[in-house]
Image (cartoon, coloured by chain):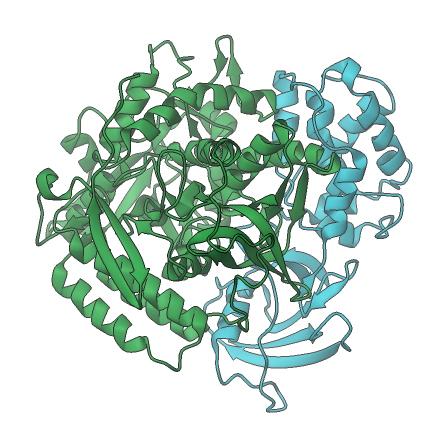
Chain colours: A green, B cyan
Amino acid sequence: MSINIIGAGLAGLSAALTFAEQGKPCNLISYAPSERAQSVMAEGGINAALDTSGEHDTVEEHYADTLKGGVYLADENAVWGLCKNAPEIVRKLDRLGVPFSHNEKGIVQRYFGGQKKKRTAYVKASTGKMLVTALVDEVRKYEVKGLITRYPRHRFVQLCLDNGVCRGVQIADRFTNETTVLSGTVIIACGGMAGLFDGMTTGSTHNTSDAVATLFAQGVELANLEFVQYHPTTIGISGKRLLISEAARGEGGRLFVRRNGEPWYFMEEKYPELKNLMPRDVVSAEMVAVTARDDCEDQVYLDMTGIDKKVWKARLSDLRDQCVHYIAVDPMKEPIPVSPGIHYFMGGIYVDERHRTNIGNLYAAGECACQYHGANRLGGNSLLGAIYGGSVAAQSAISIPLVKGGAERSEPEGLYQTTDYTEVSPALAQKISAILYCSLPIMRNEADMLEAQRELSALLTPDKNEAEKRRLTLALAMVQSAVNRRESRGAHKRTDYPERDDEHFRKTGVVRYENGKIDLTLRDIPERRSE
Amino acid sequence: MNYTIEILRQRGRDAEPYRQTVRFCTDDTEMSVATLLKTLNSMADLTDANGKTVEKIEWECSCLQKKCGACAMRINGKPRLACDTKLGEFKNGAIVLEPLKKFPVIADLIVDRSVMMENLKSIGLWLEKEARHTKKGEDLAYEASRCLQCGCCLEVCPNFIPGEAFYSAASFVPTARVLSELPKKEKADIIDSYVDKVYKGCGKSLSCRDICPAQIDVEHLLVNNNAVAVWKRFLY
């Protein structure tokens, strides 16, 4: 029996280290080495109330901002754990050699969206890459000691289920196509569902959504799929959206649109307290609103020309290089055109505070899991959520006794169906993406979403291969979740239901696939325990 | 603009390599080679210059913005990232895509680069003690931590031969982080490894400096590593 972690981005690395530091062996399974994971693309920073800026920041304020930013849909107990543990997580990363900037009080922090205090620790605009490097080196130490065994070119095939209990996982070597069954507990850390919006996100092509689609088909419950984050500042480049980090606004960047020919700094006028640093759902919706006005042009710009040269050099040099390289605009000298782009999935595998799924011995963490971020994630909380979540999942797997399967087999051989490997054809991937993108924009309405349901259902024909059927089913579950939430909250804004409706919808929307049908339920969010 | 794309193909590890040429027309000079490959693979009826159906071209990518190193390949003879190469560069429309040559080919443009990970294990690249932070150390650690492990530097290094004793820039660049952050008296093991696996084999051609897709200041890191490990001048 072993522990099997699927995914070697930050959540998977964190889970593996949690086992290894306690002398417990684990398998770390990933499609490619950690250097290729989407975690390396995270830019702006990681949140923790370190209070190194003399602003009297506290864990309580980080907790309150996270809940408010998520429009009160997150599990309060889980968020409290996240925020309470954040300072020690960042201090540990510091000890592991992440080259955070330091001053006499410790790690320097910057402003980020939805937060009034400097709470985001950073390394220029390459924070994700720096964190991955430090954790990969630390994991290597335990690889050599034999505690962490990497399977670094392996696809997730399926769970081995025994009467609804997870007994292991089947994986396949991408280079040889040989399959292997690893018995024991499984932690899924496979990343978000970017592949549902092929070529339209800031994310990695490795995050196809197919692992989550397979888990869904196998009975794993998903939650809050309708909450898809549109980051306000992205730019279309060849094959994808390029992220312009929130750090740009954290360091002084300003959004404007030309109204009657003159720059209008609409966020500063409408939100005088947080200005350009309102939560992402608010900024993106405002960008849609101003560009729809008759007196405004249809392009928003990000003006970073007022940022001090020293700040550019010390904190944003990589962001500048990226702009010059990909769009041939020097942001020090002229404003850059930006528009909202899909960046993060708040929804995913339904987990409890301890990162348990509805399947015994199966856990999930990182962006693939629905935890911490509610209806809208705050910038700086994804790296934190991945590292903390991976660690909690691992700790739970250590402390929670194994759930035994009905058949009580000693090995999980025979607990999976042998199927030929299939993948989604590029043509179908494009069709699904187009349907989802048109029906799930920043401002949604029922008619478009029902049409999307019809189109996706029409594509779900018997001639499709298994991977295609699973992706179509996941896409349908996402649209149905969005139809079902008849309110506007966070990243899910509806023109037909423009108000927030706490009475009916301050709940987690859970989807389950059973007997060939997608079943939706609204479940209560756990109440906050007293400490 | 009409592009002629010649691809060195190999359908499996033990298969015979062959060259296949496809033609593609676009006016999008900003299109990357990565997007070109994705587009070719999405064309169901793609045929080559001889009218033969083109099977799916195997290649790797992840970030598409030169942050992950997955899509390294030889493009017109030079190791580069496909996501960082725009079609506008090919003024005569001739593009040749080949797998990196110093690594075993798995299929088409996919190679097995695991030797890099094994070398990092062998050199002992991790912190045995808590990191020590200094201003200069922070800058070095940042630069060293940017390494993509793409393998382009190994491809051009005249001294690197897979499986032999010299580990080249893909090892000495990340080593700079550990050398800069370990307290002075804790550096002995990594210094021994470094001298053995890097210093003794490096001919200082610095071809790695000119090829790095992340434009890491390879020479600066090498100079610092040698100062610490060989000349015992603790520059920071």
From the viewer's perspective, is B181 left or right of A245? Answer: right
Q: Position of residue A92 (x, y in %)?
A: 55, 21
Give the camera-side residue of A284 and A148.
Answer: A148
Q: Height in image: A244 above or below A236?
A: above
* Residue A59, image quadrant: top left
Q: Residue at x 47, y 34 (%)?
A: A400
Q: Height in image: A295 above or below A119?
A: below
Give the quarter of the figure containing the C terminus of chain B: top right
Q: Is residue A62 visible?
A: yes
Q: Residue at x 17, y 57 (%)?
A: A483
From the viewer's perspective, is A159 left or right of A213? Answer: right
Give the camera-side residue of A150 and A158.
Answer: A158
Residue farthest toward the bottom in the current orientation of the protein: B51
Q: Position of residue B220 (x, y in %)?
A: 73, 31
Q: Residue at x 72, y 36 (%)?
A: B173
Q: Position of residue A152 (x, y in %)?
A: 64, 51
Give the camera-side residue of A218 and A201.
Answer: A218
State the count of labels: 0
* Residue B55, image quadrant: bottom right
